[in-house]
């Protein structure tokens, strides 16, 4: 019997309209002044208002930072930390997508002043404490509200991660109302991102465990069963709720059985070509599964039973059915399907492969070893 460690967010609130209760939660943590972290799109759409109203009703002073960018660069984090320190906040809240939540995690840590960002890239290097932290996602994709990970763009084409259980928030607040207005392309890309989290957790070579496996299977059941309806009818609150719950469960799974080559190859696509993270994953996913198939076909075959219930045959045949389904899904949802569709050419592949090979934190989890030549071949097949 193999032992394992499983860690997740301490408390989760799943309830329609629950973002209005953020003030209650923050107050229970003893906070009097918080930094609210978000991005211009979420702020402009009015999604912050229920949370802001709740905070003010509980006498909590709010300082707004709404300058988060996708794939947040270091200077955005520095600016948010400075604002938090200048306002002397005693807590951090985020209502937003994965980038906003990732920034909020780091602000809660760095505003205390016991850590430097340059010193904590990697796994388990955080030694200090953080401020109280409450996260509410506005997309059903990243699962950042239940992961101990923050991703930072540190230079052209390179992303680094800070990974520590200290980054897990005190509360994750899942309010499907925050996702009702999400455009179909964003719903599709973030939903596939969450599916990738579940698939890679289930096949993770290094830390695969039965709890993550169970969460990944249920996540795929919810995500696969609702993504078409959520994209087709964005006002369907049950579908939105199920997508958000599936995303969180996938986040819990990969927080403990980490993602691998799909993410390693997707990160350079996002960083260098400013392709949204979920779409970057979607573009390389089928070819990575084909590459991994001989090393993980039993696991892929099991997942095919969830996503392609009609799949028959042996594990290799069911894996083929899974790949076919994952190739068809972005077409059905109206997403680009090839790297060339987002402006990538054959001349870019060498640079992308170089960047992907730097993602050793992720590649070590892949069920099959990935050499640079393999990365080149996967990108070429995805072009």
Image: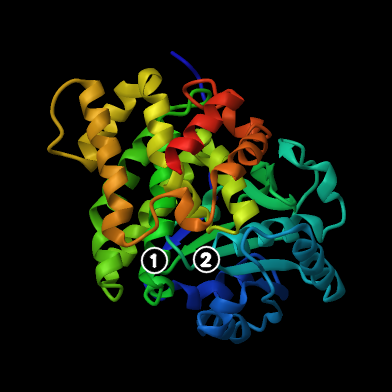
Point out residue 351 in the picture as x, y percentages from the top left corner. Answer: 66, 40
129 left or right, relative to 244: right
| Quarter occupied by residue 226 | bottom left
Residue at figure coordinates x 67%, y 69% from the top left: 68
Q: Is residue 222 visible?
A: yes
Q: Nearer the viewer, residue 39 or 13?
A: 39
Q: Nearer the viewer, residue 71 or 213?
A: 71
Which color mode does the image show? rainbow
Residue at figure coordinates x 68%, y 34% from the top left: 358
Point out residue 204 in the picture as x, y percentages from the top left corner. Answer: 47, 28
Residue at figure coordinates x 78%, y 71% from the top left: 89
- Return the residue at label 2: 136
Q: Is residue 44 above or below residue 327?
A: below
- The N terminus - image quarter: top left
Q: Is residue 96 above or below residue 218?
A: below
Marking on residue 185: 1
């Amino acid at each position: 019997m193999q032992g394992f460690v499983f860690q997740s967010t301490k408390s989760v609130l799943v309830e329609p309209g629950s973002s209005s209760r953020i003030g209650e939660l923050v107050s229970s943590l003893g906070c009097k002044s918080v930094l609210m972290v978000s991005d211009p799109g979420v702020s402009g759409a009015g999604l912050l208002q229920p949370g802001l109203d709740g905070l003010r009703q509980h006498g909590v002073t709010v300082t707004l930072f709404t300058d988060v960018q996708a794939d947040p660069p270091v200077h955005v984090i520095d600016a948010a930390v400075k604002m938090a320190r200048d306002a002397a906040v005693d807590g951090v809240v985020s209502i937003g997508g994965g980038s906003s939540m990732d920034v909020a995690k780091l602000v809660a840590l760095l505003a205390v002043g016991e850590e430097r960002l340059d010193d904590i890239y990697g796994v388990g290097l955080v030694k200090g404490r953080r401020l109280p932290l409450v996260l509410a996602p506005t997309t059903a994709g990243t699962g950042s509200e239940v992961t101990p990970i923050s991703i930072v763009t540190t230079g052209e084409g390179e992303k680094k991660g800070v990974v520590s259980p200290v980054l897990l928030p005190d509360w994750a607040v899942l309010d499907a109302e925050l996702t009702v207005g999400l455009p179909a392309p964003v719903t599709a890309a973030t939903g596939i991102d969450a599916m990738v989290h579940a698939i890679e957790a289930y096949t993770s070579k290094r830390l695969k465990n039965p709890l993550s496996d169970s969460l990944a299977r249920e996540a795929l059941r919810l995500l696969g069963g609702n993504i078409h309806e959520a994209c087709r009818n964005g006002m369907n609150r049950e579908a939105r709720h199920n997508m958000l719950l599936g995303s969180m469960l996938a986040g819990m799974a990969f927080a403990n059985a980490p993602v691998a080559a799909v993410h390693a190859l997707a990160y350079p696509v996002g960083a260098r070509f400013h392709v949204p993270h979920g779409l970057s994953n979607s573009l390389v996913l089928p070819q990575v599964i084909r590459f991994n198939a001989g090393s993980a076909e039993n696991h892929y075959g099991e997942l095919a039973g969830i996503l392609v219930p009609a799949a028959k045959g042996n594990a290799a045949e069911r894996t083929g059915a899974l790949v076919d389904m994952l190739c068809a899904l972005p077409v059905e949802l109206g997403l680009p399907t090839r790297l060339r569709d987002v402006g990538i050419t054959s001349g870019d592949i060498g640079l992308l492969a170089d960047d992907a090979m730097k993602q050793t934190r992720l590649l070590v989890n892949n069920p099959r070893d990935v050499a640079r030549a393999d990365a080149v071949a996967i990108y070429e097949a995805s072009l």
